[in-house]
Image (tube, rainbow, N blue to C red):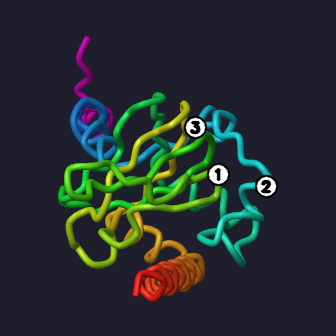
C-alpha cells in the first residue's frame, strides 16, 4: 500500500536512501577502513610474558614506565623463533632491530671460512640496531640457540610511535644511541687488544 500523503512519501524515500547508504558503507567502506587499522586484542597482551627482569636488564627500555613499555610492545611486532633458526644473515639488507624477550640467541661471523662466535644474547639484549639506523647490510649472523620470543622494531613502527607518543620515541632513540655508543666502545676495546 502506497501513501499519497507527500510528507510520508518523502520520509519513505529518505529512509530507503539511508538504508542503501548503510549497506554500501557496511559492505565496502568499513572493511577498507579496518584493513588499514591494526587491532590489538587482549590476547596479544596476555600472550606476552613481560618480566621485571627484562625491564631492568634492557638498555632499550631504560627510563620507560611499565605503561610506556606496554604501549611500545603493543605497537611493535612479536616474533617466535625456533631453536637453530637463523634470524639475521650477514650481508642482507635490514631495516629492523630486535629485542630478545625470551630465550637465547647467538651472534657469529664468518671469518676466513670459519664461524667465529661474537656474543650470546639473553632477554633484554638487542641486535640489528646498526642496520636499523644506518640502512647498512647486516654485520653478523644471528641464530636462536633456544626457542625464543623477539620484539621487532622497524622504521614504520617507530614513525607511528613518534606520531602517537613522541616522549616514548625520544627515550627510545636516546636508548638506541646509548646502545650504539656501547657497541662502539666494545669494538674499540677489541681492536686495541689486537694491536
Tell me if 141 is positioned left or right of 171 in this view. left
Residue drawn 41% across the image and 42% down it: 143
CB atoms of marks 2 and 1 within 8 Å: yes
Residue with the mark numbered 1? 123
Instruction: Measure how far apart labels 1 and 3 are at the Cα level.
Output: 24 Å
Q: Residue furthest front?
A: 195
Instruction: Measure how far apart labels 2 and 3 are at the Cα level.
Output: 25 Å
The kind of secondary structure the magenta stretch mainly shows is helix
Q: Does the magenta portion include 108?
A: no
Residue drawn 64% across the image and 51% down it: 123
* x, y percent for residue 150: 51, 46
| Label 2 Cα neighbours within 10 Å, binned few <14 / some 14-19 / many ≥20 | few
Element assignment for label 1:
loop
Element assignment for label 3:
loop
Tell me if 112 is positioned left or right of 30 in this view. left
Residue 177: in sight, yes or no? no
Magenta stretch: give its range.
1-13
| Label 3 Cα neighbours within 10 Å, binned few <14 / some 14-19 / many ≥20 | few
Tell me if 169 is positioned left or right of 122 in this view. left
Q: Nearer the viewer, residue 68 or 59?
A: 59
Q: Who comes first in sequence, dot 2 or dot 1?
A: 2
Residue with the mark numbered 2? 53
Tell me if 63 is positioned left or right of 39 in this view. right
| Label 1 Cα neighbours within 10 Å, binned few <14 / some 14-19 / many ≥20 | many
Residue 44: in sight, yes or no? yes
Instruction: Measure how far apart labels 2 and 1 are at the Cα level.
Output: 8 Å
Q: Does the magenta portion include 10?
A: yes
- Image depth: mark 1 or mark 3 in front: 1
Q: Which corner quadrant holds the N terminus? A: top left
Q: Residue 124 lies in what quarter of the image?
A: bottom right
Q: Nearer the viewer, residue 36 or 110?
A: 110
Q: Nearer the viewer, residue 46 or 2?
A: 46
Amino acid at each position: 500500500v502506497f501513501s499519497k500523503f507527500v510528507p510520508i512519501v518523502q520520509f519513505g524515500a529518505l529512509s530507503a536512501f539511508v538504508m542503501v547508504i548503510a549497506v554500501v558503507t557496511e559492505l565496502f567502506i568499513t572493511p577498507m577502513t579496518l584493513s588499514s587499522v591494526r587491532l590489538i586484542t587482549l590476547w596479544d597482551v596476555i600472550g606476552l610474558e613481560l618480566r621485571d627482569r627484562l625491564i631492568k636488564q634492557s638498555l632499550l627500555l631504560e627510563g620507560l614506565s611499565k605503561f610506556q613499555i606496554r604501549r611500545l610492545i603493543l605497537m611493535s611486532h612479536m616474533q617466535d623463533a625456533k631453536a637453530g633458526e637463523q634470524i639475521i644473515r650477514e650481508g642482507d639488507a635490514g631495516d629492523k632491530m630486535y629485542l630478545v624477550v625470551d630465550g637465547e640467541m647467538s651472534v657469529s661471523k664468518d671469518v676466513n671460512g670459519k664461524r667465529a662466535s661474537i656474543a650470546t644474547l639473553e632477554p633484554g639484549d638487542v641486535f640489528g640496531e646498526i642496520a636499523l639506523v644506518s640502512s647498512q647490510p647486516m654485520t653478523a649472523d644471528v641464530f636462536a640457540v633456544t626457542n625464543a620470543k623477539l620484539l621487532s622494531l622497524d622504521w614504520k613502527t617507530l614513525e607511528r610511535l613518534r606520531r602517537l607518543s613522541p616522549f616514548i620515541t625520544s627515550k627510545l632513540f636516546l636508548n638506541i644511541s646509548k646502545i650504539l655508543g656501547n657497541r662502539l666502545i666494545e669494538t674499540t676495546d677489541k681492536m686495541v687488544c689486537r694491536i
